[in-house]
Amino acid sequence: MAEYYGKVQKRMAYSREKLSSYLDPNCDKSDYHGIVQDLVNKVLSNETINLAEQEFVCSIIKNLRKENSFDLAYNIDDCKPCKDYNFRRRYMLYANDLNGHKSVVDFYGEVPNDKKNTDVKYLNKECLDWESYIKDKTNGGRLINYVAQETSAQIKIAKKNCEKLLIGSHYRDYLKKSLTLHGKYVYLLVKEFYQELGSDNQIIECNNEKILIDSFTYVHIMFRHYAEGIMSKNQLNKSYHFDENIGFKKIPNFLFDLLNCYKSLVISKQFNNQNIDFLINDKPYAIYLKPVIKNFKGKTQTKYLRVQTFFPIEEARELERIKTYITIKSDCGFDFLVKTSHSS
């Protein structure tokens, strides 16, 4: 049996930031082998590890070889602590072709047909299991509820669009599967972020208003504006993010930094409690906010302005709205678009 050699360290939760740092060739790797050994031992002992740890160590276990052999030491699909890693790996490979009709290429080359058939069956089962899991969870204020609500809403939109365009049941069923699996992927993505954050929300105070960024914000943006290959088949006239400087794994942090920058400027005194417009690489973007009442961990109910969505401004109506706005530059990394007294 293969073994990954290294000094075993006392168990702790390793952060995504720490594990991702090893991708930098200049980082200090003195503790790398000990961390890998620790996590490998946890997986092989069927102990639960967090999502960032799964992404890190399961990719290593998947490629371990038997001693003095090129044969794989482990079947990663049999490693229960890697179940979410296995789903995300397959989903990302087939996201734009869930039925496996087209050529699929992974790290080892083109995926053979028998392997594609196995993967497609796996994704079909994951879809049915996830659909069953979320069907009674559309009411509530937790991450799983937000994902269930958004998935249900998007499936209803898909059904209406298919009926309007006289699209047959096969493609309608495919869209439903695509949206359901995308929902599970978003759930794991958002869950991983908040595991790393150590909290389920971020709050910024601006002009005596509490601005809330939470899992609803993240889920909504990932469904509506960050999945062009999937969502553009379902939603007409939607804008999608494409700027590489906006990492989809850290959207809440991006918004948090943006809002902290905004509140430090004099222009924040003009905040209308509805939207903030800004530039990224000279392209206009907007965030929109909405009043909500939240009760966190037994505390009294509090009114917040929740960030509802964030997207590039492309629609003619929105472009018309900001056409006379002026640009206000800051020293904290963002340029904002502001209405003046001469703006219509």
Image (tube, rainbow, N blue to C red):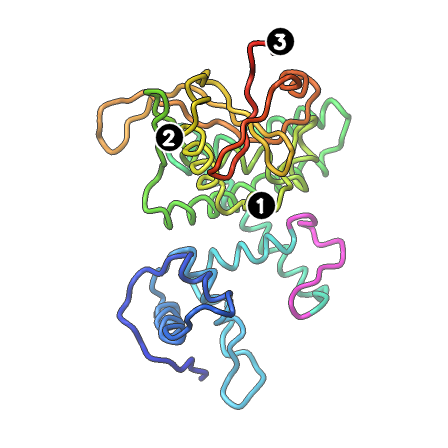
Mark 2 or 3: in front is 3
> Which residue is located at x 63 percent, y 38 percent?
281
Label count reads 3
User: Which numbered dot is residue 245?
Assistant: 1
Quadrant holding the C terminus: top right
Residue 23 lies, in percent from the top left, at 51, 65
| Image position of 109 with respect to 165: above or below | below
Give the mark nearer the N terminus: 2 vs 1.
Answer: 2
On whether residue 302 falls in the magenta region, the answer is no
Q: Determine which of the numbered discs, if any, sits on residue 100 in the image.
A: none
Q: Which label lies toward us, 1 or 3? A: 3
Callout 1: SS: loop
| Residue pointed to by mark 3 | 344
Marks 2/3: CA–CA distance: 39 Å
Per the image, label 2 sits on a secondary structure element best described as loop
- The foreground one among 308 and 73 is 308
Residue 104 among magenta residues? yes
- Mark 2 touches mark 3? (CB < 8 Å): no
Q: Residue furthest bottom?
A: 68
The reply to whether residue 62 is in sight is yes
Give the residue at mark 2: 141
Magenta span of residues: 95-108
